[in-house]
Amino acid sequence: MRNLESAMKAFPQAQFRVSWKPFFLDPSIPVEGEWLDDYILRVYGRKMDLSTSDHPLNQAGSKAGITFAYPRLVVNTMKSHRLVEYAGIQGADFQDKVIELLFSRYFENLEDISSSDVLIKIAEDAGLNGAQTLEFLKTEQYKSEVAQQYEAAKRMRISGVPHFIISKGTKGRKIQLSGGQPVAAFKEAFEELGER
């Protein structure tokens, strides 16, 4: 996200609209979560030490100003995706703030973003009403919408995050970028779509 934001700043005349869509890397993650090392062993059949500073993930994060923390719990993110939908109804700025806080609290602060208490604090820090957020989280609201959007992403053969679909207008050509991309990749996509 930070590289996308940096690229957008290089095109001050353009009007950008960022739309967040849910995606589950593994929808079968249990409610109690699973330690990242155990998850990697289960899914990939081998151990990987992601915590080393020379790991490509950490190097890319460092370039974007992100320090990934370990050991991390892999959690079920349905509630956090529902919160993103809820924040989006309140306004795009709220949604952007919630996303940024979810990322930093999970990847840098090792907070459990499946916990209602953590999500309420994130909502409050993003400027949303905590009591209303608590009441929302007690419901199943937006659960089916999140599931439908995930299924739509699978039908588009999206298999990982981040995944960016960049277009000029709703009917124009689309450029898709998968994975953590450098600022230059976004700039190139914007230029290819006619932004200067």
Image: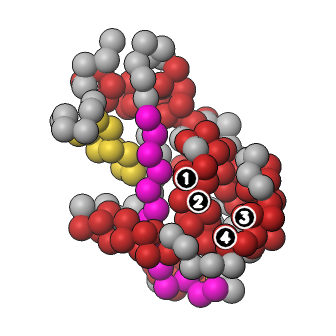
Give the residue at x 24% y 24%: 192
- The label shown at residue 89 is 1
Give the residue at x 33% y 25%: 190
Q: Main secondary structure of the magenta part?
A: loop
Q: In which quadrant of the rendered image does the N terminus lie?
A: top right
- Left or right of 137? Residue 81 is left
- The label shown at residue 133 is 3
Q: Which residue is mark 2?
A: 86
- Badge 3 element: helix
Give the residue at x 72% y 64%: 133
**Distance CA(mark 4)–CA(mark 1):** 12 Å
Q: Which residue is mark 4?
A: 136
* CB within 8 Å, label 2 to label 4: yes
Q: Is residue 30 magenta?
A: yes
Which residues are drawn in magenta?
17-31
Provide residue 93's location: percent of width, then percent of height. Answer: 61, 39
Provide residue 103's location: percent of width, then percent of height. Answer: 65, 53
* CB within 8 Å, label 3 to label 4: yes
> Which one is earlier in the sequence, the residue at label 3 or at label 1?
1
- Badge 2 element: helix
Task: Specify whether residue 116 is in view.
Answer: yes
- The label shown at residue 77 is none
The three-letter amino acid code for the residue at tag 1 is Ile
The three-letter amino acid code for the residue at tag 3 is Thr
- Badge 4 element: helix
